[in-house]
Amino acid sequence: MSLIIRTVRMSDLDAIVELESSAFDMPQEMTRKDMIGRIENYPDTFLVAQKDGKVVGHVFGPAAVDRYIKDELYFKNHPNRKEDQYQTILSLAVLPEVRKNGIATQLLMQMDKIAKKAGRKAVSLTCLPELFNFYEKRGFVNEGKTSEDIPDPDGVSSYNMVKELK
């Protein structure tokens, strides 16, 4: 069976929580609460990749007024608004056993389509230096360290990556 990219459903919650909490080393209880709020608030920009009936990846984020992600977006869910000019990506995760098969790229491409259709100017995310190459190959440009920098556990800073939509 081929890969299906679709909008999230509440029935995907368990699979999403497991994927997100393992990908980002977060407690499942906290992740579950966050994911419920995200599914409820911006289901149109929360996508899952499904293969053979199983969720194997996801990408999500709300639309925002600011070009760069502010930390509050990770903690306060809000619905997408028409006037928001930027599509954020708070998370992109794919199961380890199916990585390197283009799933993350397909998720990003579908998010681009949704953002364009909604009239957004760009897609914005933050990432660590080890992911620069991945995102740059997909059209994102490094626009420098985040201003609200929370270094990862090893003290590495995050950077703003932005992809202009044409």
Image: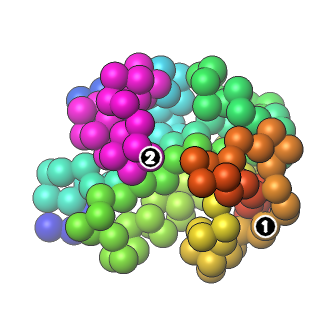
- Give the residue type at disc 2: Phe
Nearest to the eye among marks 2 and 1: give it: 2
Query: What colour scheme governs how the chains and residues are painted in the rendered image of this protein?
Result: rainbow
Q: Residue at x 52, y 47 (%)?
A: 91
Q: CA distance from mark 2 to mark 1?
A: 22 Å
Does any portion of residue 127 appear in the rendered image? no
Residue density around tag 1, few if under 14, some if 14–19, many if 20 or more, within 10 Å: some
Q: Which residues are magenta?
A: 13-35
Q: Is residue 20 above or below residue 13?
A: below
Residue density around tag 2, few if under 14, some if 14–19, many if 20 or more, within 10 Å: few
Q: Residue at x 46, y 59 (%)?
A: 107
Q: Residue at x 41, y 36 (%)?
A: 26
- Residue 142's label in the rendered image is 1
Task: Please state if 114 lies on the left or on the right of 92 as rendered.
Answer: right
Q: Which residue is mark 2?
A: 24
Q: Is residue 135 above or below residue 31?
A: below
Q: Looking at the rendering, which quadrant does residue 133 occupy?
A: bottom right
Task: Please state if 129 lies on the left or on the right of 54 as rendered.
Answer: right
Q: Answer whether residue 29 is magenta in the image.
A: yes
Q: Looking at the rendering, which quadrant does residue 12 occupy?
A: top left
Image x and y of residue 53, in percent: 15, 51
Q: Secondary structure at mark 2?
A: loop
Query: 22 or 141, which lies in front?
Result: 22
Q: Secondary structure at mark 1?
A: strand
